[in-house]
Amino acid sequence: QVQVVESGGGLVQPGGSLRLSCVASGAVFTIASMVWYRQAPGKERELVARVSGGGSINYADAVKGRFTISRDNNAKNTVYLQMSSLKPEDTAVYYCNYANVYWGQGTQVTVSS
């Protein structure tokens, strides 16, 4: 069994920054893709940023230049999402997915003055 746990969400003012963390643990034997998604109220879940097992990185157009996904060099099943220049429209529950199978419970990010 694999557990995925996100942390780091919170309330931040527009223009501020947050860093989210995601740790996959348990029956983890390979370096797999890890993906951040988000879901705002009344909207569908959408991909935010992805790092593949081989290290390729992709971003949604809405966050390019503002968000950075990175994998921990010492713990390959840990990824971070550094979010800068946050906007109210970034408000959502952010979810981490491991290996296209396992989901975390999500962490709330609220951007508001």
Image (cartoon, rainbow, N blue to C red):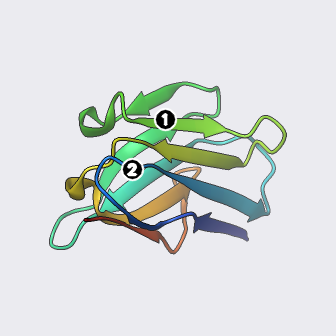
Label 2 environment density (alpha carbons within 10 Å; few <14, some 14–19, many ≥20): some
Q: Return the residue nearer the eye: 9 or 27.
A: 9
> Which residue does the image show at 63% across and 66% down from the upper left?
4
The label nearer to you, 1 versus 2, is 2
* Disc 1 target residue: 68
- Percent of width and height locating residue 30: 76, 43
Q: Is residue 54 left or right of residue 65?
A: right
Q: Is residue 96 left or right of residue 84?
A: right
The answer to whether residue 41 is above or below residue 82 is: below
Q: Residue at x 60, y 46 (%)?
A: 80
Amino acid identity at mark 2: Gly
User: How far from the left and from the top, in percent, is residue 35?
Assistant: 49, 47
Q: Which residue is mark 2?
A: 16
Q: Position of residue 28 (x, y in %)?
A: 78, 55
- Quarter in which the N terminus is drawn: bottom right
Residue 88 in the image: above or below residue 48: below
State the separation of the CA atoms marked 1 and 2. Answer: 14 Å
How many numbered discs, if any?
2
